[in-house]
Image (cartoon, rainbow, N blue to C red):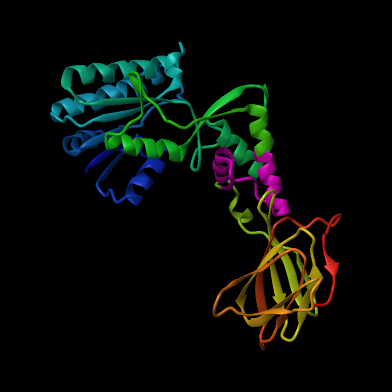
Amino acid sequence: MKILVTGAKGFVGKNLVAQLKNLGYNEIYEYDREAEEKLLYDYTKECDFVYHLAGVNRPQSEEEYMEGNYGFTRKLIEALIQNENRAPILYASSIQAELDNPYGRSKKAAEDLLFEFEKNHGNKVLVYRLPNLFGKWSRPNYNSVVATFCYNIANDLPIEIRDPNVVLRLVYIDDVVDEFIRAMNGQETRKGQFCEIPRAYTIRLGDLAEMIYSFKQACEDLSVPKLSDEFVKKLHATYLSYLPKDKFGYKLKMNVDHRGSFTEFLKTPDRGQISINIIKPGIVKGNHWHNTKNEKFLVVSGKGVIRLRRVDSSEVIEYHVSGEELQVVDIPPGYTHNIENTGDADMVVIIWANEPFDPNKPDTYYLEV
């Protein structure tokens, strides 16, 4: 299939083109405002499907709205007619088309032109009135409050909130792209005359800002937000895409002594904590037990032995472990336990605990195995 994408360098266009290529579509005609106008004629001669994403939303004058949105749509249609091409057209319109403002009127005029084209020439037309979009590669301080908040907060810049109670309706870019690709394959989501993205989220502006600030704090205290919430997961991924390049990496606090080191890596509110334990040769660590806390040990380098004993029993259970044959050993509550490095090199252990460490309630009691 040969696919024409107008506005290919825009926010939606870049994400769509990237995913089409991921899925193996190799004949993609990328048309943008810098391209020669003749290319539009050439592309409409060959294409089997048109994603019409090009548009104007921040012009120098109001007249540019109509010229960029309605005018370019007319050029696209004329090129298809000249080439006698019956390719379907998917048009990225806006919920602003319902409003009486210069931008909305220009998008509505383009919609009407496309529906008239469908009626007269038979090309299938799919019109999506998109709400506010968010996701990677959206330009901050342009037309996306999510992009602006994510960029400014990640870069220690202030944000402006005029009314924290304004309710936003948001759609995630990957959901847009998935729907657009389904539409190309004849599986669009219809709502009357128009099509829609089937998954959307609503949030107060003030709550949005608060959530993004919490992501920034999470990076600083090693925590991870509750990613079982679909919107939180998508917004968190969006925030990370705006991190400045010098903040991709950050150092961890290593608690070092003669036995090796212990370093906290990740903490979650509902999925526990991951830490890295490095143990020197011949060293034994542990000899303690927990009432409720439970752990999983995974040796990824070196070799050693994990010993466990139920606190009311004399029976010692041993697991010989090695980075050469990975296995997880569960440490149940009520079992005192230790781990010994029996090799001649440092042993590296990944430890998962069911809860982040709380110094006020450590639930850790010394007892020799």
- Identify the residue shown where x is 31% and y is 21%: 71
In this rendering, would 272 be left or right of 328? right
Choose between 161 and 362: the one closer to the eye: 362
What secondary structure do most residues of the magenta stretch adopt? helix
**In this rendering, does residue 280 appear at all?**
yes
Rendering quarter of residue 89: top left
In this rendering, would 263 be left or right of 117? right
**In this rendering, does residue 156 appear at all?**
no
- Identify the residue shown where x is 63% and y is 33%: 208
* Magenta span includes 139: no
Q: Quadrant of the C terminus?
A: bottom right
Choose between 252 and 152: the one closer to the eye: 252
- Vertical relation: 224 (above or below) 141: below
Rendering quarter of residue 360: bottom right
In this rendering, would 261 be left or right of 9? right
In this rendering, would 263 be left or right of 3? right
- Vertical relation: 235 (above or below) 297: above
- Vertical relation: 161 (above or below) 7: above
| Part of the protein shown in magenta | 212-240
Q: Quadrant of the N terminus?
A: top left
- Identify the residue shown where x is 67% and y is 59%: 250
- Identify the residue shown where x is 42% and y is 30%: 197
Question: How many discs appear?
Answer: 0
In this view, the residue farthest toward the bottom is: 344
- Vertical relation: 277 (above or below) 41: below
- x, y percent for residue 91: 33, 27
- x, y percent for residue 191: 37, 22
* Magenta span includes 226: yes
Rendering quarter of residue 45: top left
- x, y percent for residue 26: 26, 50
- x, y percent for residue 326: 56, 74
